[in-house]
Image (cartoon, helix red, strand yellow):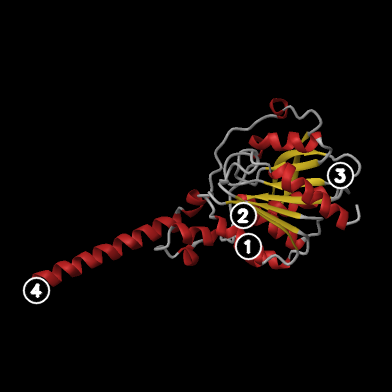
Amino acid sequence: MRIFWRLAGALALLVVFAYAGVVAYMYFNQRALQYFPDGEMTSLAQAGLAGAQAVSIPSEDGVINGWFQAPVAGKPLIVYYKGNSGSFSSEHERFTQWTSEGYGFLAFDYRGFPASPGTISQDGILADALAAFDWAAGKGYPIVIWGRSLGSGPSTYVASQREADGLLLETPFLSAVTVAEERYPVLPSRWVMQDQFPVNEWIVDVAEPVLVAHGTADTTIDVSNGERLYQLVPNKDELWIEPGGTHVDLWERGIWANHARPFFERAEAVAGR
């Protein structure tokens, strides 16, 4: 019996050390586990956006790089906050659609993503998000904000700090730490995660009308995130839950024509544009 208890104690210690090792690895490598910045850049020429221009925007002690095209009279400028992988330029199909209908856009890479130098962190992403918005606001056009996936964090933060005509959140999270806890329930994510993006806290300070879009088959950010987040929205416009929609196919499923464009038109009407 004494041997049994010794073996049991040794096994318990082994489990404790293994768990501590996993937590330590998660802590020291968390940003490499959280962000996926690798990807190819698409050029403006390849994208076929003849009316757009490459822009460099100062952000703290660095610079963020992106594309800009002004809207036609009577249309707003869409400030677009990208998701977690690759470069904003890979989503040029969206920009082509917007500009073909007279909308302007500003899209860019956060620091540490392909087009912009620097190191990725929540503080850096939020600083870049504010810098981009302020640069766009200086152009004098009406502004609507679109945040996708990871971009739901900085876009909501900006909307809580600045004035725009509307905020669209595509496949958003309630917070980044919520997603971590859902994926890894046995790990102490809330205690060790540095970049938690508390969208659930920022959203309550957003005065703009808000549209939330999510899909029921999203395996990256569970649809319950979008549903719970929408319940916290002070100025609700629409909650679009697409049956069978995934984390990456809401554009193909008609988010622009059926939801985003009508939302922006409503928001501009309310703003008296």
Residue that label 1 marks: 229
* Spatial separation of the CA atoms under disc 1 and disc 3: 28 Å
| Percent coordinates x, y for residue 108 in the rendering | 70, 42
Q: What's under tag 1, amino acid-wise? A: Leu
* Spatial separation of the CA atoms under disc 4 and disc 1: 54 Å
Residue 195 visible, this orientation? no
| Mark 4 closeness class: few <14, some 14–19, many ≥20 residues within 10 Å | few
- Residue at disc 2, secondary structure: loop
Residue 2's tag is 4
In the rendered image, which quarter contains the N terminus?
Answer: bottom left
> Closer to the camera, 85 or 119?
85
| Mark 2 closeness class: few <14, some 14–19, many ≥20 residues within 10 Å | many
Residue 172's tag is 2
80 to the left or right of 20: right
Residue sitting at x 60%, y 64%: 228
Asked if residue 223 is positioned above or below residue 94 in the image, the reply reads: below
Residue 66 visible, this orientation? yes
Residue 55 position by quadrant: top right
